[in-house]
Amino acid sequence: MKQGESLIARNLAWFIKRHATNPHALAEAIAASTIWRDVRPVTQATLFRILSGQSKDPRTSTLQPLADYFGVSVSALREYDFQSSGLDNYGNSVPLSTAAPAGGSYPLLAWEQTGNGEEVATPQRARAHFPVDLGPHGFCLRVKGASMIAEPGVWPSFPEGIILYVNPDLSASTGHFVIVQRPGQRDALFRRLAEGDGGNRYLEALNPAWPERYVPLTPADRLRGVVVHADMMLV
């Protein structure tokens, strides 16, 4: 580690390099997501202060959007030295769960299992590639279809095959991506929780061409969990 360099700055620089992005693009991507619209934005100037070492101990509220974007916990961003871990193939098929202090292995469920609310023990397991804590009841799902593919250049977007990491014990807020069981439907639904005029809540498909892009959330709908991370399993 360079003299005077904080571990947070070192980790942030490592993640930015591995994601082939830069502070300006990173700040814009976070600002464009409604997940963090109710928190103070992470500006390019803030990122430069962290990276330069001027801000050695940023607030948790500042680090949380960065940790969420890169799929790690704030504690890991503060305490774990990713650059020295030897995981140079980050973002491909190297699991970080064995090297990081949190996270684990969670069941990869079928959509109908989630929709029925079953306590299913399945032999197929999805390894968390990042130190993500989904709680004691966490599970994973593999995206099907094109309903959550956003317009080109818009982030986030969830093409078919992406693995969703779901925490069923989190309370869902507007802007969160959620798994919902709807009456009369076998499979659960993956949508963004949106709010319209008058405080009415909707389930939003990111695909602008999707039929019934906005579906009202009703009292009969059951929230099965909040998606806290997504990535692609290559092996």
Image (cartoon, rainbow, N blue to C red):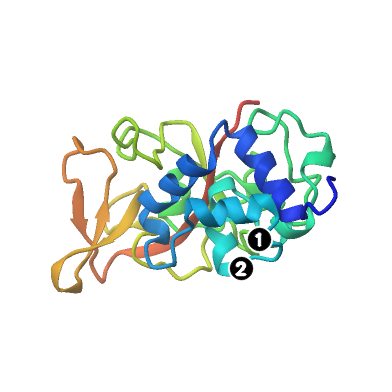
Q: Nearer the viewer, residue 45 or 152?
A: 45
Give the quadrant of the N terminus.
Answer: top right
Find the residue positioned furthest to the left.
197
Amino acid on which the number 1 mark rests in the picture? Val
Q: Nearer the viewer, residue 199 or 12?
A: 12
The percent coordinates of residue 217 (x first, y second) are 24, 63
Tag 1 or tag 2, which sits nearer the N-term? 2
- 109 w.r.t. 222: above or below: above
Q: Nearer the viewer, residue 39 or 52?
A: 52
| Residue name at image x 27 percent, y 56 percent | 203
The percent coordinates of residue 22 (x first, y second) are 54, 38
Examine the image and state in which quarter residue 129 appears: top right
Q: In the rendered structure, are the residues bearing label 2 and label 1 in contact, judged by CB atoms less than 8 Å apart? A: yes
Label 2: state its secondary structure: helix
Examine the image and state in which quarter residue 2 appears: top right
Sort mark 2 into few (<14), some (14-19) or many (20+) by Cα contacts within 10 Å.
few
Residue placed under numbered mark 1 in the picture? 74
The percent coordinates of residue 15 (x first, y second) are 64, 41
The percent coordinates of residue 64 (x first, y second) are 56, 61
Which label number is shown at residue 60? 2
Which label number is shown at residue 159? none
Amino acid on which the number 2 mark rests in the picture? Thr
- Report the Cα–Cα distance between label 2 and label 1: 7 Å
Horizontal side of 8 relative to 226 (left or right) equals right
- 96 w.r.t. 42: above or below: above
